[in-house]
Image (cartoon, rainbow, N blue to C red):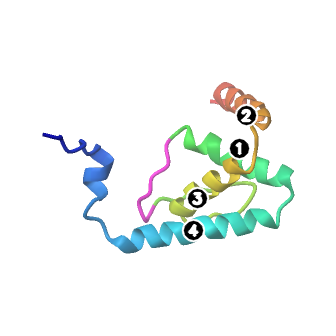
Amino acid sequence: MEQAPRQSAFDRKHAASDPTVNMMMAMYMLDAMRRFDKMPSDQVKAVASEIAVVGTRGISTAKDAVYTLKTIPVPSSRKLLCLVGAGVSRTSREDWPSVRRRLRARDTDA
């Protein structure tokens, strides 16, 4: 007898969620990809690395969560998550030493 695969906590939490959330996130991701299509690669790297640094402290998807970036305006945390996903997918591993430098600088300022 085959066992059903165990659901992760994430899957259990979101299994009954509103299906429009998935559509909304897909649209946010498409928007982020289009936004980055219009930017030079150095700017995409700057945006993605800034979001990655912010993400080290955690990113809430609560509707009232607000994040401020120096590189671009971000209207919501969910759009922020889509921007980092699209930005990282457009960069290569060689680009990420700059993120480590920014994290070290942030840690010494704190």
Three-letter amino acid code of the residue under disc 1: Ser
- Give how far across and how far down residue 103 sits, in percent: 67, 31
Three-letter amino acid code of the residue under disc 4: Tyr
Sequence-first disc among 3 and 2: 3
Q: Is residue 47 above or below residue 53?
A: below
- Mark 3 and 4 residues: CB-CB less than 8 Å, in contact? yes
- For the residues carrying marks 1 and 2, which lies nearer the camera in this image? 1
Span highlighted in magenta in the image: 58-64
Is 24 a magenta residue?
Answer: no
Residue assigned mark 4: 28
Sequence-first disc among 4 and 1: 4
Residue assigned mark 3: 82
Sequence-first disc among 3 and 1: 1
Residue assigned mark 2: 102
- Mark 3 and 2 residues: CB-CB less than 8 Å, in contact? no
- Give how far across and how far down residue 48 sits, in percent: 70, 49
- For the residues carrying marks 3 and 2, which lies nearer the camera in this image? 3
